[in-house]
């Protein structure tokens, strides 16, 4: 922790565990430190970053005209996997907001992240600690795999509990709108603040987690119902292809790969580690069993769909 703090004070970026995924964190008040994140990730500079804060008391330090809904939701869900998009204070660097008039704020619940934020006494800009378009990291080893020694300190907080990125809720004007689904659901938000819209519209701020072809493995990935998956795997293997399978509940007989729990939270927890592991076995094709399309699987299906869209593209997708 002392080394992490010292690195942050030098303007460097560090690997930070959160309850969702690992972040690549730097001092959000310093443009030079934030530019370091973009350089490491290979991310376009106009993509805004989430500012991580120690508690809801920091809302007004980063945002202005904070609506009641933000007070109510931060009181209910922080620390936790909910990011609020709000109108930014004038002093927030353009490097953080991608030049937009809004800022994304979240208070993570991982004890290491909270302790670091309290000691740092400022905001930490932190996107997921993966190269642009690649699968998000859920262990410290994943962060090392992405960046090697280019990141001086990676705090090891174990496996991320949630496993997929935070819910992003735009409260910067008009009807609250979910820009990225996550563990905190629309129903949970609506129970506290009323009607919420889903998906971006033309007026919505840009969010790279909402690009197609994100969160992608390097091997081609197809999403199929279980029966079709088994048939496709057998066909591909008959053609001499090496197939790795991501199944729901149990792995079908005779196929190689991994099975994830057949409930949404357990599946989300293991999803990115499974994609990384399957990507590393040297298969020609990844076949993932399509989960149920019910509401509780919304965030998982969102990530799987984007993973399949970006998978197997040459270079760093997208
Ligand atoms: O769970 C998470 O949110 C993780 C952990 C590390 O906290 N972070 C994360 O960051 O997923 P990142 O950069 O990979 O995705 C953040 C998303 C991006 O799609 C970004 O465009 C969007 O948040 N975002 C940040 N600030 C925004 C703003 N002012 N307006 C619209 N979108 C914003
Ligand atoms: Mg990301």
Image: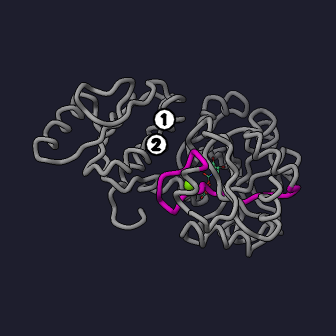
Question: Pointer 2: residues within 10 angstroms few (<14), some, or many (20+)?
Answer: some
Relative to residue 231, is residue 219 drawn left or right? right
Task: Identify the residue at image location x=53%, y=54%.
Answer: 209
Q: Which residues are magenta?
A: 120-140
Reply yes or no: does residue 153 show up in magenta: no
Displayed quadrant of residue 96: bottom right
Image height of 10 relative to 119, above or below: below
Q: Which residue is mark 1?
A: 298
Residue in the foreground of this view, choosing between 79 and 254: 254
Relative to residue 296, is residue 128 drawn left or right? right
Image location of residue 197, percent across then percent down: 58, 41
Whether label 2 touches label 1, CB < 8 Å: yes
Task: Identify the residue at image location x=42%, y=49%.
Answer: 306
Q: Which residue is mark 2?
A: 302
Relative to residue 278, is residue 75 drawn left or right? right
For this orientation, the residue located farthest to the bottom is 32
């Amino acid at each position: 922790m002392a080394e992490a703090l010292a690195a942050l004070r030098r303007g460097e970026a560090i690997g930070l565990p959160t309850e969702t995924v690992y972040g690549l964190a730097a001092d959000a008040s310093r443009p030079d430190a934030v530019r370091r994140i973009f350089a490491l990730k290979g991310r376009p500079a106009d993509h805004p970053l989430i500012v991580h804060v120690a508690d809801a008391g920091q809302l007004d330090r980063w945002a202005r005209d904070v609506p009641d809904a933000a007070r109510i939701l931060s009181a209910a869900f922080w620390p936790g996997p909910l990011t609020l998009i709000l109108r930014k204070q004038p002093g927030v660097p353009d490097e953080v907001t991608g030049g937009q008039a809004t800022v994304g704020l979240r208070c993570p619940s991982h004890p290491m992240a909270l302790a670091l934020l309290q000691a740092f006494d400022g905001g930490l800009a932190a996107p997921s600690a993966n190269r642009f378009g690649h699968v998000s990291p859920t262990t410290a080893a994943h962060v090392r795999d992405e960046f090697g020694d280019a990141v001086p300190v990676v705090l090891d907080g174990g496996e991320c509990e949630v496993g997929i990125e935070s819910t992003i809720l735009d409260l910067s004007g008009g009807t609250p709108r979910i820009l990225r689904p996550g563990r905190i659901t629309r129903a949970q938000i609506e129970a506290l603040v009323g009607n919420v819209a889903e998906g971006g519209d033309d007026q919505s701020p840009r969010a790279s987690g909402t690009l197609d072809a994100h969160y992608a493995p390097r091997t081609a990935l197809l999403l199929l119902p279980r029966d079709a998956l088994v048939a496709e795997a057998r066909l591909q293997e008959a053609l001499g292809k090496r197939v790795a399978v991501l199944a729901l509940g149990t792995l079908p007989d005779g196929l190689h790969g991994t099975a994830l729990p057949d409930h949404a939270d357990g599946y989300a927890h293991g999803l990115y580690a499974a994609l990384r592991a399957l990507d590393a076995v040297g298969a020609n094709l990844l076949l993932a069993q399509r989960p149920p399309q019910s509401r509780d699987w919304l965030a998982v299906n969102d990530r799987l769909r984007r993973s399949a869209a970006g998978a197997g593209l040459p270079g760093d997708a997208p």
